[in-house]
Image (cartoon, rainbow, N blue to C red):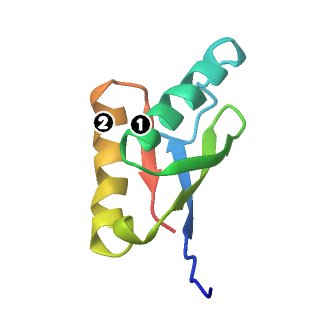
Amino acid sequence: MPSTHLSLHYHIIFSTKGPRRVIANTWRDNLHAYIGGIIGDMNAVPSAIGGPGDHAHVRVATGVPRAGPGCASGCVGLRNRISSDRSGMRLCYK
């Protein structure tokens, strides 16, 4: 029985202002887990999160329902949610 499977993958980079190395090793893993939790709340899968002290790379896998304009607004929502928590991170559009 034939079927079609589709998933979209996004690479998002969060950078500190400056860029300054303000993401300390002591709480970096907690920040990555927090970002992953937000992405999970958006019905997406954080397939990889990492980075040094001045930025974080996030690879997100989504299915068809989140594709298109909904995903773009979800990325902005992610930025706003992190910014409102005063984490010092900002979203870089590349």
Q: What element carries label 2?
A: helix
Query: How far is disc 2 from disc 1 in space, using C-alphas?
Result: 8 Å
Q: What element carries label 1?
A: helix
> As drawn, which residue projects farthest toward the top?
26
In the rendered image, residue 2, in percent from the top left (x then y), is placed at 61, 88
Identify the residue at horizontal 37%, vertical 34% (top origin).
Answer: 82
Q: What residue type is labelled 2?
A: Arg
Disc 1 target residue: 38
Disc 2 target residue: 81
Q: Residues within 10 Å of mark 1 (few under 14, many from 20)?
A: some
In the rendered image, residue 87, in percent from the top left (x then y), is placed at 42, 26
Q: Which amino acid does label 1 sit on?
A: Ile
Image position of 44 (left or right of 78): right
| Mark before the other along the chain sequence, 2 or 1 | 1
Identify the residue at horizontal 32%, vertical 55% (top origin).
Answer: 74
Q: Is residue 86 above or below residue 60?
A: above
- Image-quadrant location for residue 59: bottom right
Q: Are marks 2 and 1 in contact (CB under 8 Å)?
A: yes
In the rendered image, residue 34, in percent from the top left (x then y), is placed at 49, 27
Q: In this view, does 35 lie above or below 59?
A: above
Camera-side residue: 50 or 18?
Answer: 50
